[in-house]
Structure formats: structure tokens, C-alpha cells
Amino acid sequence: MSEIQLWTLIGIVVTFGLYIGIAWRSRVKETKGFYVAGQGIPTIANGAAIGADWMSAASFISMAGLIAFMGYDGAIYLMGWTGGYVLLALLLAPYLRKWGKFTVPEFVGDRYSEVVRAIAAVAAIIVSFTYVVGQMNGGGIVFGRFLNIDLQYGVMIASVVIFVYAVLGGMKSITWTQVAQYTVLIIAYLIPAVAVAQVMTGIPVPQVSFGQILDGLNDLSVQLGLEVYTDPFSTRPMIDIFLVTMALMIGTSGLPHVIIRFYTTKTVRGSRYSAFWALFFIALLYTTAPAVGAFTKFNLLDGVNGTPTDALPDWVSNWAATGLVSVNENADVVNTVSNDPDAGADLTVNNDILVLASPEIAGLPAPIVGLVAAGGMAAALSTAAGLLLVISSSVSHDLYFQRFRQNASDSERLLVGRIAMAAAIVVAAIMGVNPPAFVAEVVAFAFGMAAASFFPALVLGIFWKRCNAIGAASGMVVGLALTITYMIYTLEVFGTVANDHLLGVSPEGVGTIGALVNFVVTIVVSKLTTPPSEEVSEMVEGIRYPAVQRRSPAGS
Amino acid sequence: MAETEDKSPGPPGDEGPPGGNGWRREYWRKNLRLMVVLLAIWFVVPFGLGIFFVEQLNQITIGGFPLGFWFAQQGSIYVFLLLILVYCLMMDRIDKEFGVEERDEAPASGSAAAGDAATEDGSKEGGDS
């Protein structure tokens, strides 16, 4: 066992012990504790938990790698995955917290009807499921690299761990574990980034200092046959950059596993500040990621540029074992680098390894490499746990018991939820071995679907009293159908043939159009049908004010 | 939510809006106005500066960063954070002004010490029906 493997094993075992210890200490037995942690989570802790829940294997493992290869265009992920929190804070979080129940479909059920609730539950399951596949794959990559096993066995180990973990925790234990996981993952992300920034520029603040290497990076990229790093629109046209960014933003604020976190705060005011703290914690990583991408790419290109293929740095052969790095057999000297296996470059590097490999590429000591592996696992596990909770609550709370067994006991509800979770993990693991695209892109599809289904129904439900059940149902069905159809049309998933993009719209960006269509359909159909009942108007009125009025407005 | 209405007192003063619930319209209007201003900034900075006009802004370089590139990969995120903070602070003020702020809540610094039972204002259950 190499030194790096030893430290990885130590990092993973210690952190897993910590999580399971916390999960065990704060386990719950009642449904309210299980779904919304008894609504007793302090604001900053909730913010950190949202951060961990939010920052998935995609954020931790793939994002900096994607940015490294996309250059400017990587900003779609940076802006898209943070801008949605503004929408959440302003449009959804305080109102949904005021209404205060367990799941997102449940709000939709109260506001519209039981049929809409069922549609929303199915949408929540599809969205969360797509998302969890990415986590499986991410966890598998970590195990695969550091314990030297095939990706498929890595995925299997990851799913067993996630299963044990998810069954242990209701929302309460998941939340407190996520606070610990956030701490692990942010430390694991920042230490190598700060170290690399210090070594390369003498300024230990990566956010500021990566500006200094951009010129050099642009030159190196051109020499090795890549695009100029800071030039926009090299991978996508402007219209598509706009659509994808918007789809990710709207999708963020429509993701059930994120929204549900705002149900767990103590007060309406707490839910607003939770959004602030969540974005604060997320921004720590998201402003560092582009620096990590730029530094790592600079080091990578600098280390291999013009190097004979038999004298490449150690990390190349270490990672070659996972199949994620490969050297062209016909090349003697590295003159071209690519992330696309079909490009036939002298050195091919998969996006997903850049963060995990960055300490090695920069030549940092082995314990830090182990720490990064533990951070990657923390990111994958925390998000998977949150998603599996949504899947299990949708299946058990919103579908099975709502439709078939309204009088079921608490323990029966939890049991059915856990069975649903187990089934979801098995299917997700199978798909995790053969993901439709890179990890971050798999996740991007979930956003498109969330954008096209939930967001319009929730926003209109809060801000437009006239919006009715038929309108919301038609909007969700049409928006979701359009989005999924276009994704299947343009991608090779489920054995279909990939067709060309229409009007430059990529499958990741179609969610914006799906959301727009959803809004239009909902409004038109609502206008044409009867208004919702008096009670529904009362309910909407009620969620608009944080508390019962105790004083008249100032000045009166 | 019937409870809110029952308790809302007819404004004792005469310059209050007409009707017992006039304050609601006023509160909601202030909320919406704040929201629209913040959302306008939310749209202009990332999409305007970071995407539509990125090539023009990239002509300017600050600290090694082409400006448009900086807005797309750094600046937008700082702006988002600022927008949410402003929203939280302004809403605190509006809530206080209209007397609808919550009692007994944990301070924003997140002290876990506040009792669980005391933190609910009781109005939540009223919204369930």
C-alpha cells in the first residue's frame, strides 16, 4: 500500500466514524424529526448543512475540472449554482417556511390539489433520482482511485456506505452530520488551494491570485492546441451560455432537497438568514473553484508540455490505473492535451480527476491527498443522503400513504420510506456505473427538470392567488414533458440516438425554456378555468406575513 | 389564515390605511418593491456584465483578470451574497415597522440555546387547514 493510499484510508475511516457517531447521537423516531428535524435547527448550522447538501460530488470533484477545460464558459456552473439562492431567498424560502410542513409536494397538494401533489411527487422522484446517480458515480471515482479498484466496484462500495448512512439518519441526524461534512469538505478544498496559490504567486488567497497566472495559462493553452482560457463562448454560443446559466439558477431554487432545508429553521426570519449563510458557505468553495481550475490546469500543462511520454510526472501513471488519464501510444513527446477521448491528443485527461489529482499534480504531501479524498466522499455522501430523504419521503409520505393508507402508523411510514430508499440506491448504483455523461452534466439534467416543473408552480402559488390546480398541473406536465423529450432527443440515453441541437439550445439549457413554457401554460389555463376557493386564497394570504400582527404600522 | 385577521387590530390612528387589513396591502407592496429592485440587480450583473457584454468588458484588465471574465467567475457570486444580505436586513426593518416580526427567535448568530417550544409563534398551525 502506497503512502497516499494509507492516508486516504485513514482520512475516510476517521471521517466515516465521525459521521456515523453524529448520526447515531441525533437519531430520531418521530416523523416530524425525520422529515424536518423538529424545525429546531439554528440558522448558521442550517446554512452549513444546506452547503453540504448542496455541494455534491459534482461541485467538489467535477466543477473545477470542468472549468479548467471550459475556461470562461465554466462560469455557467459558478453563476448558475449560486444565483439560484437569490431566487430561493426572495421568492420561496420565507413563504414555504411560514406554511411549514414536511415535503415540497405537500405544499403543492395544499395549495392546488391532490392530483397536482401526485404529479409533484413523481417529479421530485425523477429529479432527485437523476441527481443521486451523479453522487454514486462521484463516490465510485474516489474509491476507485484511492483504493485502486475498478469504477464499478467503487460504485458498489459507495452505495453500501450511502445506504447504511441514509438509513441511520432522519433529517435531524442528516443535518448535524452535514454540518460536519461541510467542515471536512471545505477544509479539504481550501488547504490545497491556498497552498498552491501561495507556492505559485506568493499570495495565499486563491480568489485574488489566480489573476496573475491567466496570461501564462492563455499562452500555454494555445501552444498545446486548446482554446484561449479567458475567451468567452469557445464551447457554447452566447445564447446557450445564457440559457444554461438561467436553467441552473431556476433549477437550484426548484430542487426539492434544497427547498426542504428551509422547512427546518425555527422561524421565517431564520429561513431568510439560512439562505444567506448557505450561499456564504457555498461561495467559499465556489469562488475558490475557478482558481483551483486555473492553477491545476497551468501546472498540468506546464508539467507535460514537450515532455517525452516515458518521463511524465508520477500522477499520470497513478491515475492511468483508473482509466481516467491516458497517454496516446503513438506519441513520443506530449504536444497536445485534451479532455475528449475522441480527439486523439497525446495526453487525455478526464475532467473529473482534476480536483482529486490537484495536490499530486502540484506535488503536495500525501496526507493532503488523503484529506481531499475524504472531502470528495463527504460531498458525495451528504448530498446523496439529502436526496434519498426526498425520494423516500415522496414515495412514502406523498404517494403511498396519501393514496392508499392514510391511517398508517409512524413506524410503518418510516419502514416504507426506507424500502423506497433501498430500491432507489440499487437502481442509482446501476446507472452510476454507466452514467449518460460526465458527473456534473448528469446533475445539470436534474436542474433542467426541476426548473421546468417545480419553480413556476411554487412561485405562482405564492405570488398569484388566481393560479389554480388545473393550471399548475398542466404547466408542470407540459414543462416537464418538453424538457425530458428534448433531452432524450439530443442525448444518447436509454439507447436513443443523439440528434443535433435545435437553434443552439443544449440539453442542459432547455430547462429555461421548459420553465417559461410552464409559466405561460399555467397562467393561460388558470385564466380560462375557475378561480381557486376562498380557503386557498386565505392560505396564500397567510403565508405572506411572518407572524400575527401585534402592533399597528409605525406612525399610526 | 383566519387567526391573523382576528387579531389584527383596527388601526387606532387615523392615518392608517382604511380597513383593518389595509396594512397588509402596504406591507406586501413594500416587500414586492424591494424584491423587484433586488431581482433587477440579480439579472443585470451576471447576465449583462458576465455574459452579454463580456467581450467588451474583457478589454479592461484589473489585477490580471479581464473584467468580464472576473464578473462571470467571481464578481457575480459576491453580488448574489450581498443581495441576500440586503434583503434579510431590509425585511427585518419592514417586519418591525408593521409589527409582524417573530418573537423569541434564536438570534441570527445561531445560538442553539433557545428553547424549542418557545420559538413557535403559534400562527403556523393556523395555516395548515
Image: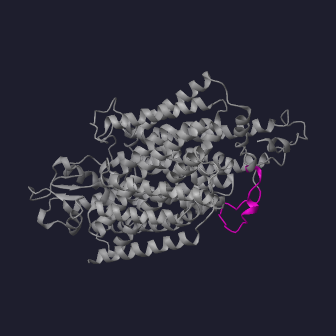
- Does residue A210 appear in this view? no
Which sits in the foreground, A520 or A273?
A520
In the visual, does A293 lie left or right of A311?
right
Q: Quadrant of the C terminus of chain A?
A: top right
**What stretch of residues is rendered in magenta?**
B103-124
Tell me what residue is drawn at x 44 percent, y 55 percent: A286
Decide whether residue B115 is among the magenta residues.
Answer: yes
Question: Is residue A214 positioned above or below A76 on the image?
Answer: below
Tell me what residue is drawn at x 58 percent, y 56 percent: A413
Expressed as whole percent of the image width and height from the top left, the position of residue B27 reads: 74, 40
Tell me what residue is drawn at x 67 percent, y 66 percent: B111
Which sits in the foreground, A70 or A205?
A70
Secondary structure that dominates the magenta span:
loop
**Which image quadrant for residue A305?**
bottom left
Which sits in the foreground, B8 or A299?
B8
Question: Is residue A318 positioned above or below B9 on the image?
Answer: below
Expressed as whole percent of the image width and height from the top left, the position of residue A308 reads: 11, 63
Q: How is the image coloured?
A: one colour
Question: Is residue A547 positioned above or below A27 on the image?
Answer: above
Expressed as whole percent of the image width and height from the top left, the position of residue A93 reads: 61, 48
Which sits in the foreground, A545 or A410?
A410
Expressed as whole percent of the image width and height from the top left, the position of residue A349 reads: 24, 56
